Amino acid sequence: MPEFTVGQELPELRVPVTRSTVVRYSGASTDFNEIHFSDRHAQAIGLPGVVAHGMWTMGAGLKLVTDAVGDPARVLSYFVRFTRPVLVPDTDEGTEVVYTAKVTEVADGVAKLSVTATCGDEAVLGAARAEVRVD
């Protein structure tokens, strides 16, 4: 079990997302809302184009935490607010979400982490935090 100290930054995680990623997630989650695969439908409700699922964005970020603790069962809680959708262009490269985390507290065998997620220059998750068992 790695040791956690207040102020410690976890290694950055960069996660690519393409239209193919979004379509596969639609099937896995059974969320077939057209905003996740159709520019026309996304634009009809005021979005600039196809967006990744919020739950994909949230779940992809949890990998940063589980990699750090080594065992997903050590995650006690994980919370995020969705601040901006992840726009996924219709290109081979798609886009990339960058996740970082910092240890904010360690007490009684529990570490609290502040997680950030950005796409380009914009935060896509807000108030994201996790608690992990470290004893």
Image (cartoon, rainbow, N blue to C red):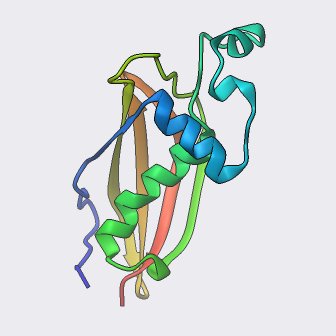
Relative image position of residue 73 (x, y in whole percent): 48, 82
Relative image position of residue 9 (x, y in whole percent): 24, 56
Image height check: is 47 above or below 69?
above
| Relative side of 40 to 125, left or right | right
For the C terminus, the image quarter is: bottom left
Which is nearer the eye, 48 or 23? 23
Image height check: is 21 above or below 19?
below
Indicate the quadrant where residue 24 lies: top right
Indicate the quadrant where residue 31 lies: top right
Relative image position of residue 12 (x, y in whole percent): 25, 48
| Relative side of 134 to 129, left or right | left
Q: Residue visible at 57% across and 36% down?
A: 23
Q: Residue visible at 43% across and 30% down?
A: 18
Q: Residue visible at 45% across and 76% down?
A: 72
Total labels drawn: 0
Which is nearer the eye, 8 or 121? 121
